[in-house]
Amino acid sequence: MEFLFKLADIQNIAKEIINQSNHKVILFDGQMGAGKTTLIKALSKELGVIDVANSPTFSIVNEYKTETNQTVFHFDLYRLEEEEEAYDMGIDEYFDSGNWCFIEWPEKTPNLIPDEHHTIKFELIDENIRKIIFK
């Protein structure tokens, strides 16, 4: 599926993505500033996250709780130097937990990504409009 949207429409896009998802692991592919974290915040809100969703750039992973006490994991793998760092922190256990896992910079851990996942690819159309491809 493809979506062309403005920031004001992002919550509707998040709802559609959640409704269309067959897998709870979602990879986010796009350049810095493309809107990955912004969409993850909207997805988290759609799932009922009560915490403030922020990029886990320095901690690698943030854990958010929903209103129904479910857990959502948000990964930012940008700072990883080697794939083994993610393995050592038990990233595969997060992926196997059955919880939602949103992963920024998944190309840092290509051998650890589960087979069953979705990918959201971002394209900047202009300053206000984004195109995403959801697979």
Image (tube, helix red, strand yellow):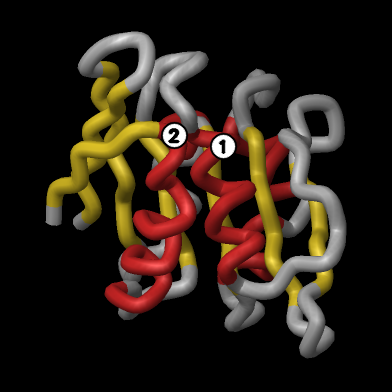
Residue 116: image quadrant is bottom left
Q: In the figure, is residue 115 to the left or right of 91?
A: left
Measured as percent of width and height from the top left, residue 31 is found at 40, 17
Q: Are marks 2 and 1 in contact (CB under 8 Å)?
A: yes
- In the rendered image, the residue lying farthest to the bottom is 68
| Residue under the image location 56 percent in, 37 percent down | 38
- The furthest residue to the top: 127
Q: Quadrant location of residue 75?
A: top right
Is the residue marked by circle 2 packed among few (<14), some (14-19), or many (20+) residues within 10 Å?
Answer: few
Q: How far, Cα to Cα, is label 2 from label 1?
A: 9 Å
Q: Which residue is mark 2?
A: 7
Dot 1 surroundings within 10 Å: few (below 14), some, or many (20 or more)? Answer: some
Which residue shows up at 82% across the image and 71% down it? 65
Q: Is residue 114 left or right of residue 70?
A: left
Query: What SS does tag 1 mark?
Result: helix
Q: Amino acid at mark 1?
A: Thr
- What's the amino acid at mark 2? Leu
Q: Total of numbered circles in the picture?
A: 2
Give the percent coordinates (x, y) of residue 53: 76, 48
- Along the line of sight, the residue nearer the viewer: 2 or 127: 127
Residue at numbered disc 1: 38
| Foreground pick, 17 / 78 | 17
